[in-house]
Image: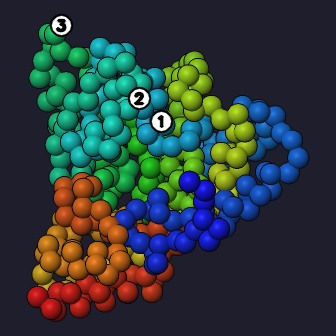
Amino acid sequence: MPLSAEPLQPLPRHQFASDNYAGICPESWRAMERANVGHARAYGEDAWTLRASELLREIFEHDCDVYFTFNGTAANSLALAALCQSYHSIICHELAHVETDECGGPEFFSNGTKLLLASGKDGRIQPSEIRRIVHRRKDLHYPVPKVVTVTQATELGTVYSPTELVDISSEARACGLKVHMDGARFANAVASLGATPAELTWKAGIDVLCFGGTKNGMAVGEAILFFDRSLSEEFKYRCKQAGQLASKMRFLAAPWVGLLESGAWLNNARHANNMAERLEGRLKKLPGISFIAPRQANSVFVDLPEQVAAGLRARGWVFYTFIGAGGARFMCSWDTTTEDVDHLADDLTSLLGSL
Protein backbone atom coordinates (compact mmCIF):
# COMPACT_ATOMS: atom_id res chain seq x y z
CA MET A 1 0.00 0.00 0.00
CA PRO A 2 1.51 3.37 -0.98
CA LEU A 3 2.09 5.98 1.68
CA SER A 4 -0.42 8.80 1.84
CA ALA A 5 0.64 12.11 0.35
CA GLU A 6 -0.49 13.73 3.61
CA PRO A 7 2.31 14.35 6.13
CA LEU A 8 2.44 11.93 9.04
CA GLN A 9 0.99 13.59 12.13
CA PRO A 10 2.47 13.36 15.62
CA LEU A 11 0.38 12.48 18.65
CA PRO A 12 -1.98 15.35 19.49
CA ARG A 13 -0.07 16.35 22.62
CA HIS A 14 3.06 15.53 24.53
CA GLN A 15 2.64 12.18 26.22
CA PHE A 16 3.72 10.60 29.49
CA ALA A 17 3.97 6.96 28.45
CA SER A 18 7.73 6.89 27.93
CA ASP A 19 10.72 9.13 27.41
CA ASN A 20 11.16 7.10 24.21
CA TYR A 21 8.20 9.03 22.79
CA ALA A 22 10.19 12.27 22.68
CA GLY A 23 12.07 13.35 19.59
CA ILE A 24 15.76 14.13 19.17
CA CYS A 25 17.07 17.04 21.22
CA PRO A 26 18.67 19.93 19.28
CA GLU A 27 22.22 19.18 20.42
CA SER A 28 22.07 15.61 19.12
CA TRP A 29 20.34 16.67 15.91
CA ARG A 30 22.93 19.31 15.10
CA ALA A 31 25.77 16.89 15.76
CA MET A 32 24.27 14.36 13.35
CA GLU A 33 23.99 17.11 10.74
CA ARG A 34 27.65 17.99 11.20
CA ALA A 35 28.60 14.33 10.91
CA ASN A 36 26.66 14.07 7.65
CA VAL A 37 29.29 15.96 5.66
CA GLY A 38 31.57 14.09 3.30
CA HIS A 39 32.95 10.61 3.82
CA ALA A 40 34.29 9.03 6.99
CA ARG A 41 35.88 5.72 7.91
CA ALA A 42 33.42 2.93 8.68
CA TYR A 43 32.90 0.54 11.61
CA GLY A 44 33.97 2.92 14.37
CA GLU A 45 37.25 4.15 12.94
CA ASP A 46 35.90 7.64 12.31
CA ALA A 47 36.74 10.82 14.20
CA TRP A 48 33.25 11.13 15.71
CA THR A 49 33.45 7.73 17.40
CA LEU A 50 36.92 8.47 18.71
CA ARG A 51 35.76 11.84 20.05
CA ALA A 52 32.66 10.39 21.72
CA SER A 53 34.76 7.71 23.39
CA GLU A 54 37.24 10.27 24.71
CA LEU A 55 34.45 12.49 26.03
CA LEU A 56 32.99 9.55 27.94
CA ARG A 57 36.39 8.80 29.44
CA GLU A 58 36.72 12.42 30.51
CA ILE A 59 33.27 12.58 32.09
CA PHE A 60 33.74 9.30 33.93
CA GLU A 61 37.37 10.10 34.86
CA HIS A 62 38.45 6.65 33.75
CA ASP A 63 40.37 5.08 30.87
CA CYS A 64 37.56 2.66 30.11
CA ASP A 65 36.81 0.67 26.97
CA VAL A 66 33.81 2.12 25.11
CA TYR A 67 31.43 0.45 22.65
CA PHE A 68 28.25 1.74 21.01
CA THR A 69 25.09 -0.24 20.27
CA PHE A 70 21.75 0.63 18.74
CA ASN A 71 19.58 -0.01 21.80
CA GLY A 72 19.52 -0.85 25.49
CA THR A 73 18.41 -4.45 25.20
CA ALA A 74 21.44 -5.24 23.06
CA ALA A 75 23.75 -3.27 25.34
CA ASN A 76 22.60 -5.04 28.51
CA SER A 77 22.39 -8.46 26.92
CA LEU A 78 25.81 -8.35 25.30
CA ALA A 79 27.51 -6.83 28.34
CA LEU A 80 26.06 -9.47 30.65
CA ALA A 81 26.94 -12.22 28.20
CA ALA A 82 30.54 -11.03 28.28
CA LEU A 83 30.58 -11.60 32.04
CA CYS A 84 29.03 -15.06 32.06
CA GLN A 85 29.26 -18.56 30.72
CA SER A 86 26.06 -20.38 29.84
CA TYR A 87 26.12 -22.33 33.13
CA HIS A 88 26.37 -19.13 35.22
CA SER A 89 23.59 -16.98 36.64
CA ILE A 90 22.85 -13.28 37.07
CA ILE A 91 21.32 -11.80 40.21
CA CYS A 92 18.85 -8.99 39.53
CA HIS A 93 15.90 -7.36 41.23
CA GLU A 94 12.59 -9.06 40.51
CA LEU A 95 11.37 -5.88 38.77
CA ALA A 96 14.60 -5.21 36.85
CA HIS A 97 14.29 -4.31 33.18
CA VAL A 98 16.51 -7.23 32.18
CA GLU A 99 13.97 -9.54 33.81
CA THR A 100 10.66 -7.96 32.82
CA ASP A 101 11.19 -6.13 29.54
CA GLU A 102 13.96 -7.59 27.41
CA CYS A 103 12.25 -10.70 26.06
CA GLY A 104 14.94 -13.04 27.37
CA GLY A 105 17.73 -11.09 25.66
CA PRO A 106 20.37 -11.66 28.37
CA GLU A 107 19.59 -15.37 28.41
CA PHE A 108 19.66 -15.59 24.62
CA PHE A 109 22.96 -13.81 24.04
CA SER A 110 24.67 -15.70 26.87
CA ASN A 111 23.42 -19.04 25.53
CA GLY A 112 21.27 -19.75 28.55
CA THR A 113 22.57 -17.89 31.60
CA LYS A 114 19.79 -17.88 34.19
CA LEU A 115 18.44 -14.79 35.96
CA LEU A 116 18.03 -15.23 39.72
CA LEU A 117 15.54 -12.80 41.24
CA ALA A 118 16.19 -10.76 44.36
CA SER A 119 13.75 -8.71 46.38
CA GLY A 120 14.11 -5.21 47.74
CA LYS A 121 11.98 -2.19 48.53
CA ASP A 122 11.21 0.34 45.79
CA GLY A 123 12.97 -1.60 43.05
CA ARG A 124 16.40 -1.70 44.73
CA ILE A 125 18.35 -4.86 45.51
CA GLN A 126 19.21 -5.38 49.15
CA PRO A 127 22.85 -6.48 49.68
CA SER A 128 21.72 -9.27 52.00
CA GLU A 129 19.79 -10.77 49.09
CA ILE A 130 23.02 -11.27 47.17
CA ARG A 131 24.56 -13.44 49.87
CA ARG A 132 21.30 -15.33 50.40
CA ILE A 133 21.03 -16.23 46.72
CA VAL A 134 24.72 -17.09 46.33
CA HIS A 135 24.68 -19.45 49.32
CA ARG A 136 21.23 -20.90 48.70
CA ARG A 137 22.70 -23.77 46.72
CA LYS A 138 26.22 -24.90 45.91
CA ASP A 139 25.56 -28.19 44.12
CA LEU A 140 26.46 -29.14 40.58
CA HIS A 141 22.83 -28.98 39.44
CA TYR A 142 22.39 -25.24 40.02
CA PRO A 143 23.73 -22.39 37.85
CA VAL A 144 26.68 -20.61 39.47
CA PRO A 145 26.02 -16.94 40.38
CA LYS A 146 28.52 -14.79 38.54
CA VAL A 147 27.11 -11.25 38.19
CA VAL A 148 24.92 -8.77 40.02
CA THR A 149 23.10 -6.27 37.83
CA VAL A 150 21.47 -3.09 39.15
CA THR A 151 19.15 -0.71 37.30
CA GLN A 152 19.92 3.02 37.70
CA ALA A 153 17.38 4.62 37.89
CA THR A 154 15.24 1.62 38.83
CA GLU A 155 12.06 0.45 37.16
CA LEU A 156 10.12 2.22 39.92
CA GLY A 157 11.89 5.52 39.32
CA THR A 158 14.05 5.33 42.44
CA VAL A 159 17.82 5.70 42.50
CA TYR A 160 20.75 3.97 44.19
CA SER A 161 22.94 6.32 46.24
CA PRO A 162 26.74 5.95 46.06
CA THR A 163 26.68 4.34 49.52
CA GLU A 164 24.05 1.81 48.47
CA LEU A 165 26.08 0.93 45.39
CA VAL A 166 29.23 0.47 47.48
CA ASP A 167 27.33 -1.85 49.82
CA ILE A 168 26.05 -3.92 46.88
CA SER A 169 29.40 -4.13 45.12
CA SER A 170 31.19 -4.99 48.38
CA GLU A 171 28.79 -7.86 48.97
CA ALA A 172 29.20 -8.94 45.36
CA ARG A 173 33.01 -8.88 45.63
CA ALA A 174 32.87 -10.90 48.83
CA CYS A 175 30.91 -13.52 46.89
CA GLY A 176 33.23 -13.43 43.87
CA LEU A 177 30.75 -11.65 41.58
CA LYS A 178 31.10 -8.87 39.01
CA VAL A 179 28.72 -5.88 38.98
CA HIS A 180 26.87 -4.57 35.93
CA MET A 181 24.70 -1.46 35.79
CA ASP A 182 21.76 -0.97 33.44
CA GLY A 183 21.93 2.82 33.08
CA ALA A 184 19.16 3.48 30.57
CA ARG A 185 18.32 6.49 32.78
CA PHE A 186 21.74 6.89 34.35
CA ALA A 187 21.79 10.61 33.54
CA ASN A 188 18.58 11.08 35.52
CA ALA A 189 20.19 9.38 38.51
CA VAL A 190 23.23 11.66 38.26
CA ALA A 191 20.96 14.71 38.13
CA SER A 192 18.87 13.45 41.04
CA LEU A 193 21.75 12.64 43.35
CA GLY A 194 24.14 15.45 42.47
CA ALA A 195 26.94 12.89 42.38
CA THR A 196 29.57 12.54 39.66
CA PRO A 197 29.37 9.77 37.07
CA ALA A 198 32.53 8.30 38.57
CA GLU A 199 31.03 8.23 42.08
CA LEU A 200 28.03 6.30 40.77
CA THR A 201 30.05 3.76 38.79
CA TRP A 202 33.65 2.58 39.07
CA LYS A 203 34.34 4.38 42.34
CA ALA A 204 31.38 2.49 43.79
CA GLY A 205 32.58 -0.85 42.41
CA ILE A 206 30.69 -1.05 39.10
CA ASP A 207 32.60 -3.07 36.49
CA VAL A 208 30.43 -2.35 33.43
CA LEU A 209 27.88 0.37 32.68
CA CYS A 210 25.34 0.48 29.88
CA PHE A 211 24.80 4.24 29.56
CA GLY A 212 21.52 5.22 27.91
CA GLY A 213 21.36 7.89 25.23
CA THR A 214 18.02 7.12 23.57
CA LYS A 215 15.89 8.16 26.55
CA ASN A 216 18.01 11.28 27.02
CA GLY A 217 17.42 12.93 23.66
CA MET A 218 19.10 10.77 21.03
CA ALA A 219 17.41 8.94 18.17
CA VAL A 220 19.15 5.64 18.91
CA GLY A 221 22.23 4.61 20.74
CA GLU A 222 23.66 3.34 24.02
CA ALA A 223 27.25 3.33 25.23
CA ILE A 224 28.81 0.36 27.00
CA LEU A 225 31.67 1.31 29.31
CA PHE A 226 33.98 -1.40 30.64
CA PHE A 227 35.75 0.09 33.64
CA ASP A 228 37.50 -3.24 34.07
CA ARG A 229 39.02 -3.45 30.60
CA SER A 230 39.98 -7.11 31.03
CA LEU A 231 36.27 -7.94 30.80
CA SER A 232 35.93 -6.53 27.28
CA GLU A 233 38.34 -8.94 25.62
CA GLU A 234 36.89 -9.86 22.22
CA PHE A 235 33.72 -7.86 22.98
CA LYS A 236 33.86 -6.29 19.52
CA TYR A 237 33.16 -9.72 18.07
CA ARG A 238 30.02 -10.03 20.19
CA CYS A 239 28.82 -6.70 18.84
CA LYS A 240 29.50 -7.75 15.27
CA GLN A 241 27.85 -11.14 15.60
CA ALA A 242 24.77 -9.61 17.26
CA GLY A 243 24.27 -7.08 14.46
CA GLN A 244 25.27 -4.18 16.73
CA LEU A 245 28.39 -3.04 14.86
CA ALA A 246 27.15 -0.06 12.87
CA SER A 247 28.92 0.36 9.55
CA LYS A 248 28.21 4.11 9.66
CA MET A 249 29.15 4.30 13.32
CA ARG A 250 29.61 8.08 13.18
CA PHE A 251 25.83 8.46 13.26
CA LEU A 252 25.63 6.54 16.53
CA ALA A 253 28.59 8.41 18.00
CA ALA A 254 27.97 11.98 16.80
CA PRO A 255 24.83 12.49 18.94
CA TRP A 256 26.90 11.54 21.99
CA VAL A 257 29.38 14.24 21.05
CA GLY A 258 26.52 16.74 20.85
CA LEU A 259 25.11 15.67 24.22
CA LEU A 260 28.42 15.50 26.06
CA GLU A 261 30.19 18.59 24.71
CA SER A 262 27.19 20.81 25.34
CA GLY A 263 26.28 19.36 28.73
CA ALA A 264 22.83 18.54 27.38
CA TRP A 265 23.08 14.96 28.70
CA LEU A 266 22.78 16.33 32.24
CA ASN A 267 20.59 19.35 31.46
CA ASN A 268 18.05 17.12 29.69
CA ALA A 269 17.95 14.73 32.64
CA ARG A 270 17.67 17.53 35.17
CA HIS A 271 14.78 19.06 33.23
CA ALA A 272 12.93 15.73 32.99
CA ASN A 273 13.39 15.19 36.73
CA ASN A 274 12.09 18.68 37.47
CA MET A 275 8.99 18.10 35.39
CA ALA A 276 8.31 14.85 37.26
CA GLU A 277 8.77 16.71 40.54
CA ARG A 278 6.23 19.29 39.38
CA LEU A 279 3.77 16.55 38.45
CA GLU A 280 4.31 14.86 41.80
CA GLY A 281 3.56 18.13 43.57
CA ARG A 282 0.30 18.56 41.68
CA LEU A 283 -0.81 14.97 42.28
CA LYS A 284 -0.08 15.10 45.99
CA LYS A 285 -2.84 17.68 46.30
CA LEU A 286 -5.45 15.39 44.74
CA PRO A 287 -7.66 13.01 46.74
CA GLY A 288 -8.00 9.44 45.54
CA ILE A 289 -4.42 9.05 44.31
CA SER A 290 -1.80 7.01 46.15
CA PHE A 291 1.89 6.87 45.26
CA ILE A 292 3.47 3.47 44.60
CA ALA A 293 7.09 4.54 45.03
CA PRO A 294 8.93 7.73 45.93
CA ARG A 295 9.72 9.98 42.99
CA GLN A 296 13.47 10.32 42.67
CA ALA A 297 14.06 10.66 38.92
CA ASN A 298 11.80 11.44 35.95
CA SER A 299 8.81 9.17 36.58
CA VAL A 300 5.80 9.21 38.87
CA PHE A 301 4.06 5.95 39.82
CA VAL A 302 0.52 6.14 41.20
CA ASP A 303 -2.56 4.03 41.75
CA LEU A 304 -5.53 5.49 39.91
CA PRO A 305 -9.20 4.57 40.14
CA GLU A 306 -10.02 2.51 37.05
CA GLN A 307 -12.63 5.03 35.96
CA VAL A 308 -10.08 7.85 36.11
CA ALA A 309 -7.49 5.90 34.11
CA ALA A 310 -10.11 5.18 31.45
CA GLY A 311 -11.12 8.82 31.43
CA LEU A 312 -7.54 9.96 30.85
CA ARG A 313 -7.22 7.63 27.88
CA ALA A 314 -10.53 8.87 26.50
CA ARG A 315 -9.08 12.39 26.58
CA GLY A 316 -6.08 11.28 24.55
CA TRP A 317 -3.48 10.62 27.21
CA VAL A 318 -1.13 7.68 26.79
CA PHE A 319 0.59 6.12 29.80
CA TYR A 320 1.84 2.70 30.87
CA THR A 321 0.29 0.41 33.45
CA PHE A 322 2.48 -2.65 32.93
CA ILE A 323 5.81 -1.30 34.21
CA GLY A 324 7.19 -1.91 37.69
CA ALA A 325 4.75 -2.96 40.41
CA GLY A 326 1.58 -1.97 38.58
CA GLY A 327 -0.43 1.21 38.71
CA ALA A 328 0.05 4.08 36.28
CA ARG A 329 3.47 5.39 35.29
CA PHE A 330 3.83 8.96 34.08
CA MET A 331 7.25 9.48 32.51
CA CYS A 332 8.70 12.91 31.79
CA SER A 333 11.30 13.59 29.11
CA TRP A 334 13.74 16.24 27.96
CA ASP A 335 10.98 18.12 26.11
CA THR A 336 8.17 17.89 28.67
CA THR A 337 6.85 21.38 29.45
CA THR A 338 5.16 22.86 32.48
CA GLU A 339 2.07 23.23 30.30
CA ASP A 340 2.12 19.49 29.58
CA VAL A 341 2.33 18.68 33.27
CA ASP A 342 -0.39 21.14 34.25
CA HIS A 343 -2.69 19.96 31.44
CA LEU A 344 -2.40 16.35 32.65
CA ALA A 345 -2.89 17.37 36.27
CA ASP A 346 -5.91 19.48 35.36
CA ASP A 347 -7.51 16.54 33.55
CA LEU A 348 -6.83 14.30 36.55
CA THR A 349 -8.39 16.90 38.84
CA SER A 350 -11.48 17.08 36.65
CA LEU A 351 -11.90 13.32 36.43
CA LEU A 352 -11.43 12.78 40.15
CA GLY A 353 -13.94 15.52 40.86
CA SER A 354 -16.56 13.75 38.77
CA LEU A 355 -16.40 10.50 40.75
Residue 323, position as x, y percentages in the image: 27, 55
> Does residue 115 appear in the picture of this structure?
yes
Looking at the image, which residue is at 19% across and 55% down?
Answer: 325
Residue type highlighted by circle 3:
Leu
Please state if 303 lies on the left or on the right of 313 as rendered.
left
Judging by the rendered image, the residue that carries numbered circle 3 is 140
Where is mark 2, residue-wise? 80
* Amino acid identity at mark 2: Leu
Mark 3 surroundings within 10 Å by alpha-carbon count, few (fewer than 14), some (14 through 19), many (20 or more): few
Label 1, secondary structure: give it.
Answer: helix
Residue 272 seen in the figure: no
Report the mark closest to the observer, 1 or 2: 1
Residue 74 marker: 1
**Residue 354 location, quadrant:** bottom left
Residue 31, above or below 13 = above
Q: Is residue 295 left or right of residue 152?
A: left
User: What distance separates the C-alpha of mark 3 from that of mark 1?
Assistant: 30 Å
Relative to 76, residue 200 above or below = below
